[in-house]
Amino acid sequence: MRFESSIDINAPAEKVWALVDKLAEWPQWMPSIKKIEMLSKGPLTVGSKFSVTAKVSRLTVKLLMTITKFVPERTVVLQGKALGTKLTRFYILEPVNGKTKATVGGEVSGVLAWLARRGGQAISDEIAQAVKKRVEGSE
């Protein structure tokens, strides 16, 4: 089950990336993200691991995520599991005429995939809107 949210941001991809790349700061401006803890040392790259605590509806979920694809200033793909559900998340930045099209989404499978998809869609929508507001508001 796939879900995604796209939004146009009035800023170059490099500026959007500067915000996306600072995972530890996400809880400061993202209401659903309660905590992100880096489990790997060094900069983000393929194989980096971190834990995300998120509030989805009335549930608080802790996910262990691993980066499986990493293209600086363009794409990050993560994989993890929670509550018997396999989750893949992606963040894609596409430069378009000095602006950036940001796509946030994922795919879920497993016993509670229908619930995870609904929560994943809500968080994807929230992330897209929050990134736009944060980046455009800082100009």
Image (cartoon, rainbow, N blue to C red):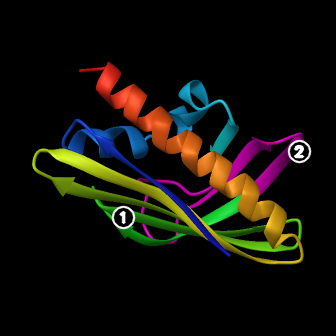
Q: In which quarter of the image is the C terminus?
A: top left
Q: Quadrant of the N terminus?
A: bottom right
In the picture, measured across the screen, residue 45 lies left or right of residue 105, that is left
Query: In the image, which residues are magenta?
Result: 39-63
- Residue assigned mark 2: 59
- Residue assigned mark 1: 75
Q: Residue at x 36, y 64 (%)?
A: 75
Label 2 is placed on what type of residue?
Leu
Q: Which of marks 2 and 1 is in front?
A: 2
State the count of labels. Answer: 2
Q: Residue at x 56, y 46 (%)?
A: 125
Residue 83 position in % (x across, y down): 88, 65
| Mark linked to residue 21 | none
Residue 46 position in % (x across, y down): 45, 71
**Cα–Cα gap, marks 2 and 1:** 28 Å
In the picture, measured across the screen, residue 56 lies left or right of residue 27, that is right
In the picture, measured across the screen, residue 9 lies left or right of residue 89, that is left
* Vertical comparison of 2 with 18: above or below: below
